[in-house]
Amino acid sequence: MSKIRTAFFCQNCGYETAKWTGKCPSCNQWNTFVEEKVQKEIPLRQQEWKEDVKRVNKIVSLDEVDAIEEQRFLTPDGELNRVLGGGIVAGSLVLVGGEPGIGKSTLFLQNALLLKHLKILYVSGEESEQQIKMRANRLKINNEQFYLLTETSTQTIFAEIKKLKPDLVIIDSIQTLQTPLIESAPGSVSQIRETAAEMQRFAKETNTPVFLIGHITKDGSIAGPKVLEHMVDTVLQFEGDQHYAYRILRTIKNRFGSTAELGIYEMTGDGLRQVTNPSEILISQREDMLSGVTIAATIEGLRPMLVEVQALVTQSVYGTPQRTVTGFDLRRLQLLLAVLEKRGGFHFGVKDVFLNIAGGLRVEDPSIDLAVLCALLSSFEDLAIPNKVCFAGEVGLSGEIRAVNRIEQRIAEAEKLGFEKIFISKYNKKGLDFSKLKIEVVPLGRVEEVYQLLF
């Protein structure tokens, strides 16, 4: 006989308590506790996907463990391979989050249909078989090894998995699943935690990779308890502006690779197209020289990119000057304005400042500082910077231009795209062979030197 009890769960972080509390002691959020039924039960057939193989766990020395390279298989999607750290790892559990309508289901349906050498099971708790068929017809990809299941009960899903024995499972979405072990509504904290735990056990014990598509809350975090992100091996964020055609797949957590990677896609009528050279889309095509526009050589993960920085400095009409940014950190902008005010004597305190990173990309690389600073000066003086010039350098509080990492890759990317001159920190000169470069490299030490050279 199973024992049923009730507990209160925080809908924000998943903290459990026996009585209702106004403020969560874990995440400090107010009015987030909801009462849920908890059914503690040891199921007779908990591991329905397994054959009758008994595994005995025992204590072993670290030296006795064989270091085996994880098995990976590559997908036809180079951008997905990049963010996963070099392909899909066997037995891995991957969580993908993103806003509604951004293209999560399209991305993984497209990749599943392209993996023609694997047996794929696509479990949908949100769409009917006819809706998925219509989307597959729009993608114009055929795959005889692709199987559909529209079901939300984990018991039924594992019964079908045991019959089919798929090589890859995609769940769309984790918030719609429910397990008979928990008596609460689908999408509740306890349901998400238990169904994710069942998927984790299945992935690890059968060595089958599982992709979980998840919803996000209004503040951009993945819906459900934070423990969900700790349980999975990889967390991917699919983001982008609804008004732009470009989408970014960003790695938030990865146990098998770097967490700084991103993949870029373009949304088309036939699905998502990989963008192999992001520098070309992040730099707007313009013929006239305009003030307030500079090009920065940045790096995201292992990928060098050139992005366009646009600045507009105008006389403040109201009493308090405005500071508006898109794709850049507002506090970093205020720091750079303070450096210009103190070290250069420019009166930005009476000016409105607007800053935009073109293409809808958000950049956190500190090497963009020099390009932002030059864009601000260009708009302030209303003097254009030549089109074939780019920048790579971090700006310190004393006005010095600091060295940035992997400068060779940044210079090579600028040279490949036809730039004639790149401004870098003089502390990056060590080890650089200027004779082999077709691009002119200008090493600088302070902000004043940049101003004298450009204006």
Image (cartoon, rainbow, N blue to C red):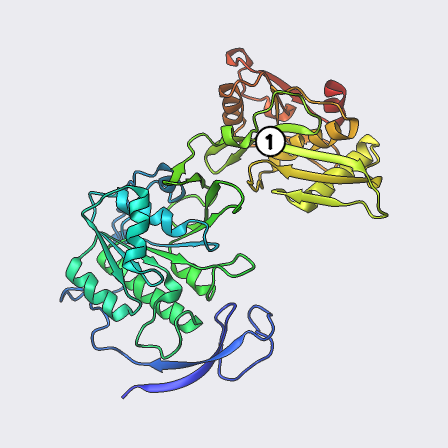
Which quadrant would residue 200 be assigned to in this image?
bottom left
Which quadrant would residue 385 be assigned to in this image?
top right
Residue lying at the far top of the rendered structure: 435
Q: Is residue 312 above or below residue 158?
A: above
The answer to whether one can see residue 210 in this image is no
Residue 27 horizontal/vertical position (percent): 57, 68
Secondary structure category for the residue under label 1: strand
Label 1 crowd (10 A; few <14 / some 14-19 / many >=20): many
Residue 210 horizontal/vertical position (percent): 30, 55
Would residue 344 appear left or right of 438 to someone viewing this image? right
Q: Which residue is drawn at 39% across and 61% down?
A: 231
The answer to whether one can see residue 328 in this image is yes
Query: Which is more toward the observer, 224 or 299?
Result: 224
Residue 39 horizontal/vertical position (percent): 35, 81
Residue lying at the far right of the rendered structure: 319
Q: Residue at x 86, y 48 (%)?
A: 319
Residue type at numbered disc 1:
Glu
Would residue 349 appear left or right of 86 to someone viewing this image? right
Residue 74 horizontal/vertical position (percent): 29, 40
The N terminus: image quadrant: bottom left
Residue lying at the far left of the rendered structure: 52
Q: Residue at x 27, y 50 (%)?
A: 90
Would residue 419 appear left or right of 355 to someone viewing this image? left
Judging by the rendered image, the residue that carries numbered circle 1 is 308
Q: In this view, does 308 lie above or below 327?
A: above
Q: In this view, does 189 lie above or below 247?
A: below
What is the count of numbered marks?
A: 1
Q: Residue at x 61, y 30 (%)?
A: 403
Which quadrant would residue 401 be assigned to in this image?
top right
The C terminus: image quadrant: top right
